[in-house]
Amino acid sequence: SDIDAGKPHPFVYVNALVHGAGVDSVDLDLAVAIDDSAAGVCAARLAGVWTIGVASGNIDALDAGIFCDARIDDLAQVPFTVGQLIDL
């Protein structure tokens, strides 16, 4: 694997966005992460990514909601699809 550190280290999101999606590192705050784990929302926040926490994971149990810019109950509440984002 080319990932040296796992969540909650921000490298996971930074690497995926910069090397995988070609996002400029100064534009990470324009990205959106949707994650249902406490470690995931923490990693996204540390990476500077706008973060949506999905309550169906362990976010509430571990009081990780403080790392979320927004929270939803499940993925059905996401108001867009990846295809819609690509079309923007």
Image (tube, grey):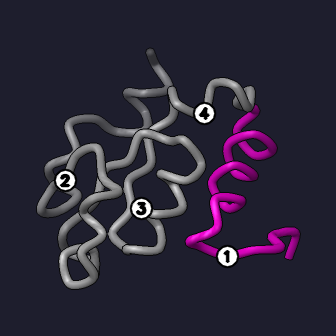
For badge 2, the amino acid type reads Arg
The answer to if 19 sits in the magenta stretch is yes
Where is residue 63, by image quadrant?
A: bottom left
Q: Nearer the viewer, residue 71 or 63?
A: 63
Callout 1: SS: loop
Residue 71: mark: 2
CA distance separating discs 4 and 2: 20 Å
Mark 1 and mark 3 lie on one chain; the one further toward the N terminus is: 1
Part of the protein shown in magenta: 1-22
> In the rendered image of this protein, does residue 4 appear above or below residue 46?
below
Counting from the top left corner in percent of width and height, residue 43 is at 54, 62
Foreground of the two, 47 or 76: 47
Residue on which the image places disc 4 = 28
Examine the rendered structure and indicate whether residue 75 appears above or below residue 24. Answer: below
Q: Residue under circle 1?
A: 6
Disc 3 to disc 4, how far (Cα)?
14 Å
Q: Secondary structure at mark 2?
A: strand
